[in-house]
């Protein structure tokens, strides 16, 4: 053993034998010193951690001493705060029902107390930011804009009634040759349709030729005699013209001086043969329809417009037309006439649209969809999205964002409607923000109907929150420091 180690051992032994200043003889602190260091003993707890305490020392059933709990081991009590006042009790399932006193619902669940400071205004609903994000709530500001909405309708394409023609004979006769012999055939104005023979026509030609010959023979007679013969010739010529004998055929009659046995009936206009009753060799009578011809270079589109849209339609309005035969292609037309009557079954009125058809691609009886570019007014009006409007039965309501998760249901008076926006006449100011999505979810989550009832008396919306004057004050009982022991 080194001298240094030997000195250390001797010193420790001396200290133990003679006593080190400040250290107890037995090596343990006295109880008074422990109490002074750790504070007052509050109570004694079970050594096994069981929920059992004692104000005095004791042993458990196994003979183990209870452990003292000192004042320093317990957290200092927080300063007492004034208890919050219970305003009312709300339904635990979120139903629009409240109670001024504690109660249970039909399933035995306790109504939940609502304390002072937790409630929102009587006409407001509050949604937490987490709930707002979860529901996907979006808002949009009320703004002034020119409100417009196109009028949509359906209709059928038809021939222009002003471009329909019939070919009839004004005399009795027979069809000698049929030159246009099929339905759907295209004809030009003045094109020969058929060659006919008529005894009446031949007699009228002879009368005309005789009158012209007599007029030449009486060239040296008195003026009165010549005037009478001239009137006979003019009368015979007028008769031929009334039978719609063409000018070139009459000129040929004058040049040749012989009656023609066959005369040609010609097409009155360009178009398509819609109907043909003429058959070669058949006999026809005066007024009998032999052909029906339609000029299809311009058509009518007769659309059925609903009653509520008639005030947006006017003559001269541009129309965009689509047909099933040409998907994705648009045709242009103009409103020409609005029929003065309404169909009592469908509550629609017919609107006539003139539709150019120079290439003949469109055909009568085609089904068409029409869109009329309509504008309600030229001045900007206050509008909100149509999705912001909640139908609450008798009146429209919107949710106005107040900030900090607060929303106020507010009644509005609406005006004209567009496709995406609706005019607001009363209830909102410019730039006020309204909820445009998830507003129905807010209605379900936040008991909107009860909030509405507080400022409008909605029938069937349930009871509203009672006022503080009618709500008993029942502050919660203070907790005991040894509760559960």
Image (tube, grey):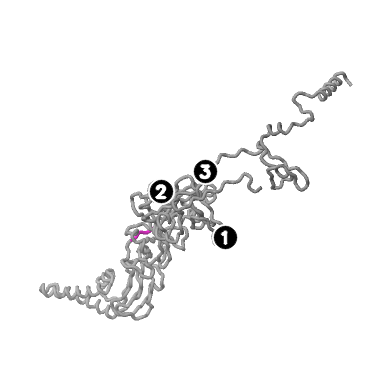
Q: Residue at x 47, y 60 (%)?
A: 327
Q: Quadrant of residue 289?
A: bottom left
The residue segment tinted magenta is 331-335
Q: Position of residue 9 (x, y in %)?
A: 85, 23
Sooner in the amino-acid sequence: mark 1 or mark 2: 1
Task: Quickly name the residue at label 2.
Answer: 142
> Given the current orientation, which residue lies at the most extreme top position?
3
Circle 2 sits in a helix, a strand or a loop, which is it? loop
Q: Is residue 42 left or right of residue 128?
A: right
Circle 3 sits in a helix, a strand or a loop, which is it? loop
How far apart are the two marked residues, 1 and 2, measured between alpha carbons? Answer: 46 Å
Q: Nearer the viewer, mark 2 or mark 3?
A: 3
Task: Quickly name the residue at label 1.
Answer: 108
State whether residue 45 is above or below residue 107: above
Q: Nearer the viewer, residue 402 or 381?
A: 402
Q: Nearer the viewer, mark 1 or mark 2?
A: 1
Q: Is residue 473 magenta?
A: no
Circle 1 sits in a helix, a strand or a loop, which is it? loop
Mark 3: give few (<14), some (14-19) or many (20+) Cα within 10 Å.
Answer: few
């Amino acid at each position: 053993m080194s001298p240094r180690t030997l000195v250390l051992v001797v010193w420790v032994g001396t200290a133990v034998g003679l006593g080190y200043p400040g250290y107890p003889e037995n090596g343990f602190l006295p109880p008074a010193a422990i109490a002074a260091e750790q504070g007052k003993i509050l109570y004694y707890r079970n050594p096994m951690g069981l929920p059992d305490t004692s104000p005095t020392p004791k042993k458990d059933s196994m003979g183990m001493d209870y452990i003292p709990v000192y004042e320093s081991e317990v957290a200092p009590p927080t300063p007492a705060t004034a208890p919050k006042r219970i305003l009312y009790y709300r339904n635990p399932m979120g139903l629009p029902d409240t109670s001024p006193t504690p109660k249970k619902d039909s399933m035995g669940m306790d109504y939940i107390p609502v304390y002072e400071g937790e409630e929102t205004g009587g006409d407001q609903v509050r949604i937490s930011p987490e709930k707002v994000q979860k529901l996907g709530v979006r808002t949009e500001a009320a703004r002034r804009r020119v409100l417009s909405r196109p009028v949509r309708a359906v209709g059928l394409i038809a021939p222009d009634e002003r471009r329909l023609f019939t070919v009839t004979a004004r005399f009795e006769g027979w069809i000698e040759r049929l030159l246009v012999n099929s339905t759907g055939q295209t004809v030009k104005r003045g094109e020969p349709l058929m060659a006919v023979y008529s005894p009446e026509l031949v007699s009228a030609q002879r009368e005309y030729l005789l009158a012209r010959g007599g007029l030449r023979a009486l060239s040296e007679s008195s003026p009165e005699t010549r005037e009478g013969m001239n009137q006979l010739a003019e009368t015979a010529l007028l008769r031929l013209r009334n039978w719609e004998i063409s000018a070139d055929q009459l000129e040929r009659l004058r040049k040749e001086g012989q009656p023609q046995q066959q005369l040609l009936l010609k097409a009155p206009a360009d178009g398509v043969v819609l109907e043909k009753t003429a058959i070669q060799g058949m006999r026809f009578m005066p007024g009998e329809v032999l052909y029906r011809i339609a000029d299809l270079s311009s058509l009518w589109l007769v659309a059925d417009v609903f009653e509520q849209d008639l005030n947006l339609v006017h003559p001269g309005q541009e129309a965009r037309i689509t047909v099933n035969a040409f998907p994705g292609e648009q045709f242009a037309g103009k409103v020409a006439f609005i029929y003065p009557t309404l169909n009592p079954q469908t509550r629609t009125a017919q609107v006539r649209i003139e539709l150019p058809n120079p290439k003949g691609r469109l055909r009568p009886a085609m089904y068409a969809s029409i869109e009329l570019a309509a504008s309600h007014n030229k001045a900007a009006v206050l509008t909100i999205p149509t999705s912001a409007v909640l139908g609450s039965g008798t009146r429209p309501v919107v949710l106005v964002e107040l900030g900090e998760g607060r929303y106020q249901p507010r009644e509005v008076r609406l005006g004209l409607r567009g496709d995406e926006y609706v005019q607001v006449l009363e209830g909102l100011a410019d730039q006020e923000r309204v909820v445009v999505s998830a507003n129905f979810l807010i209605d379900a989550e936040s008991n909107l109907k009860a909030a509405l009832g507080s400022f409008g008396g909605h029938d069937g919306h349930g009871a509203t929150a009672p006022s503080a004057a009618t709500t008993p004050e029942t502050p919660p009982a203070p907790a005991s420091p040894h509760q559960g022991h």
